[in-house]
Image: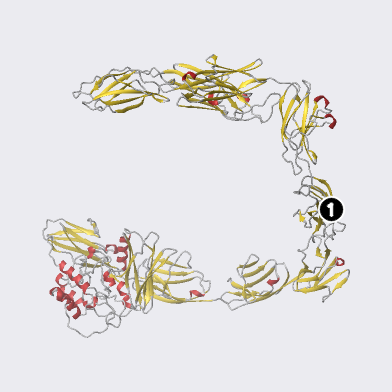
Amino acid sequence: MPEPTKKEENEVLAPAPASPPEEPKKEKEAGTATITEPKKEKEARTAPAAEPKKEKEAGTAPAKDEEEATPPSALPPEWSIGEPPAGEEQDKQQNANSQLSTLLVEKPQSGTVKVGENITFIAKVKAEDLLKKPTIKWFKGKWMDLASKAGKHLQLKETFERHSRVYTFEMQIIQAKENFAGNYRCEVTYKDKFDSCSFDLEVLESTGTTPNIDIRSAFKRSGEGQDDAGELDFSGLLKRREVKQQEEQPEVDVWELLKNAKPSEYEKIAFQYGITDLRGMLRRLKRMRRVEKKSAAFARILDPAYQIDKGGRVRFVVELADPKLEVKWYKNGQEIRPSTKYIFEHKGCERIMFINNCSLTDDAEYYVTAGDEKCSTELFVREPPVMVTKQLEDTKAYCGERVELECEVSEDDANVKWFKNGEEIIPGPRSRYFIKVEGKKHILVIEGATKADTAEYSVMTTGGQSSAKLNVDLKPLKVLTPLTDQTVNLGKEICLKCEISENISGKWTKNGLPVQETDRLKVVHKGRIHKLVIANALTEDEGDYVFTPDAYNITVPAKVHVVDPPKIILDGLDADNTVTVIAGSKLRLEIPISGEPPPKALWSRSDKAIMEGSGRIRAESYPGSSTLVIDVAERDDSGVYNISLKNEAGEANANIKIKVVDIPDPPVAPSVTDVGDDWCIMNWEPPVYDGGSPILGYFIERKKKQSSRWMRLNFDLCKETTFEPKKMIEGVAYEVRIFAVNAVGISKPSMPSKPFVPLAVTSPPTLLTVDSVTDTTVTMKWRPPDHIGAAGLDGYVLEYCFEGSLKSTSAKQSDENGEAAYDLPADDWIVANTELIEKTKFTITGLPTDARIFVRVKAVNAAGASEPKYYSQPILVKEIIEAPKIRIPRHLKQTYIRRVGEAINLVIPFQGKPRPELTWKKDGAEIDKNQINIRNSETDTIVFIRKAERSHSGKYDLQVKVEKFVETASIDIQVVDRPGPPQVVKIDDVWGENVALSWTPPRDDGNAAITGYTIQKADKKSMEWFTVIEHYHRTNATISELVIGNEYYFRVFSENMCGLSEDATMTKESAVIAKDGKIYKNPVYEDFDFTEAPMFTQPLVNTYAIAGYNATLNCSVRGNPKPKITWMKNKVAIVDDPRYRMFSNQGVCTLEIRKPSPYDGGTYCCKAVNNLGTVEIECKLEVKVIYQGVNTPGQPVFLEGQQQL
């Protein structure tokens, strides 16, 4: 194959690529149609094309076994600038897109359109992760932007669907022309993301080529003074297009004019020669000038572009200015290494690279580097077209058959597209179309052909096409078994069946309307048999049914008739078909009936027919029901009525009982049997006649005798014949009456009862208790009744009887109070008071000693005596000795501390009977009653000191004695005062800015422990005292940070719980802080031994606890190492008992007893153990039970602050 020729650089007038896609948007807004290029590094690329004449002039150079391709100066007429073969562009886009992020969710697909028709390309972008609308650009070829070409033949649209958040971009080509064919590209950008897709457009019925275009037409925008304004100017550069014949003008080299002209003359030249896109030409002119610069490394650079057929061999040659320079070859930015495909040669200063067996993947940009410089070129690999060697043939087939359309192409496994009526066929998993490829043979298979498959089918390759027509007809159809007319009973199954000669589907209609399949109606198709099955036939299923096979003008009819025997529907009546009507009202009894055809109804009573007419009792007939009408019901209308139905399918009969009811007669006047304070009990008899309906209940009314206004007492019916009216006023006369009620209504009222007056005794007295007992008397006390009433309370009667007079020892429980009531005859009870007593306390006298008596009390008013209140048990007439007990308050169980001058008032309660003797002692000596006041009562003793002095401190012992029983208790009183000053304050040492002080504790500590010291300093010059240290616990201290050169005095205050001492002790001599310091010798201290055996600093104290209330035992202990604490009860260790909780915090030990009972009383011990020893401390706990009344025998126990009744 001869080697293509190349032309000298100075003869190549190829337009340079336009600005890149990143040009500012202002040009688009101004309407300027700029021509852009994809990448910056492709600036050196030129459009490879050559005119035949120029190639011949350059001559040819034959090669031995290689085929070299050099770039021509212009494209051949069948190429468009920027439109390489489709395979090359797709390979490039796939390589580029593999490195980019994906934005397109639906990419435009290649398409075919006929001249004059429309086609739309769609691209979709998912906007879920995008904050704003992405930018999209449509290109033809590699660099022609179509944004400015919108008009008559091109429309660009964009929409946004909010629900799916998808942007849809459309490019619509209208009335396509032959020159619109070619490769297109869609680019989408969003911030740093980029995506693109290439697709092809093929325009059928193309015409011959057009003459070459002048370079000036490439820069004329469409729509400026031309008849084809708004059309797609796809022939922007050296692209064939249909142009109108223009007047012949002399050929002028516009490029030379622009290169040689001044910049101020550019617009004039553009206007003169019709160049509207002057800005694009200037950008190209700038690049052309930039190319003319000589290279320091290359004597001859690569040609702008090379073109080679697929499978050929290409040769790249550069000539170096310096043969010592290192040369590297690159393809799409990746270095090329020598191999069988890539061969490198060196011939002097020439550097040659051969590419063997070129494929579409070799279609790329190449550049070579020498030192710091490089030159680039672009290789175009052209693929030979695929031809159709065997054409499609017209075919005829029947519906349901398999159809195969077959053709052959010139190459194996070639890319072939099938079309149906111009639309591409895309096989899928659910499609009836699929394509078989057997080498060069391509077969389109259609499974189960239908009439819709009748169309023109075509096949298209890159070098040819073929078409054929497919005609699909129906097979002749015969009805083998027709439908038959049917008559069925209501509720039975209807089955319509027919058989046809072909296995095709069909449609069922009823009375001309399509039959819809439901749960009750089923359509069955099995092979050639078609069924319509209706379960549980209804009257609305009756009609004309027709089966029509699909795609055939044949019908199979049948009629269905549904019949039903007559039925009487009595669902609305009760079990015995009884209808109740109120006397005087109108009865309209409507009985639903059914039957097909509609039956005739006849009413009768006692074999006497009831006719239809206008009588008081008559029958009426309506569609679907029959009605019996009684205008004014009477008691005589009660009875059995018969209804009978009859039609051609059968007969039906039913009996209905009609009952006429009325209101009942009034009851007899009621009688009042019992009367209370605000209530009474009344009885009555039912009415003689209940009105034919059972009595449902009664209403009761009452009124005052002097009033005429009745008031109803119950709003809910009273089912019984007895009632208890309440909330009446005592002493007022009342009358009552009754109403009877049945289902019909309320009767007239009964006659009023005899007048009655509510009046009742009081309730029993409450809280009957024993106040005191002697050898001959018993004093009882009680509280008034809870309810006295309007009659008031006149007084009380106290009665008693001896235990030996009981006839029965059994007792019965009172329902109201839950206390014992003794069943004794009235004669056995002795009245203690001859007259009514108004007080709630009375003493029964003259009783024998050691006797046992029962006591009860009654409240008396105008209505009589109330129910008695009994004492719960017999009372022994004998004075009982109660052992003394002292109740020390909780705050007195520890040392009682008061300051000098404060008052001391201590109240100590005690118990004991008879009245005990009390003795107070202080520190074992009798108390001076001139200084300390003692007051005693039956239940407590009081110690009062108006102004406490320190001499009042000490231990006070209380002794309570009842006959031979003695109880003692002790109280520690501590009266404290402010301490005296320390005895002596000395200056032990002075060094630097420091002074060491020491002092001795005060002689008088104020009867309280010394808690600390306060140290002050004063300058000798001013003698103003300033506090240096407060609350200091030791008796020596070091004062630092003193001013050098000053002379200081110091004084110390002592402090206890009452405060600082009134005076302070000052140092006798002063401390001078000398300017020349002396060396301080640190004293040697021996390590202090902090270990200590356990010791209780606060002991346990005897405690009283109340049953049911939590009690705590507290003590404090110290020791080092920290001692282990163990609690014991009665010498038994307490371990894992939920009733006890033990705490230890900062040496304070606490034992909590949760809700103690008398069982929890005893001796408790706290034991502390460490390595140096063991110590124990004990206390007694007594648990008392609280009684709210009297505990006999014995006296009640009261809590502190509780008063006796």
Residue 975 coordinates in the image, percent (x, y) = 47, 22
Disc 1 secondary structure class = loop
Q: Residue most toward the left?
A: 322
User: Dividing the picture into quarters, in which one does residue 861 lie?
Assistant: top right
Residue 45 seen from this side:
yes
- Pick out the residue farthest to the bottom: 247
The residue shown at (48%, 65%) is 430
Q: In this view of the protein, which residue sits in the foreground, 799 or 701?
A: 799
Comparing 258 with 903, the one in front is 903
Q: Residue at x 16, y 66 (%)?
A: 290
On the picture, is 884 further left or further right than 924? right
Residue 1170 appears in the figure: no
Residue that lies at the very extreme toward the top in this rendered image: 925
**Amino acid of disc 1:** Ser
Quarter of the figure that contains the C terminus: top right
**Figure disc tally:** 1
Farthest front residue in view: 930
How far from the left and from the top, in percent, is residue 688? 88, 57
**Residue topped by disc 1:** 753
- Quadrant in which the N terminus is drawn: bottom left
Percent of width and height locating residue 399:
53, 73
Q: Horizontal and vertical percent for residue 699?
A: 79, 55
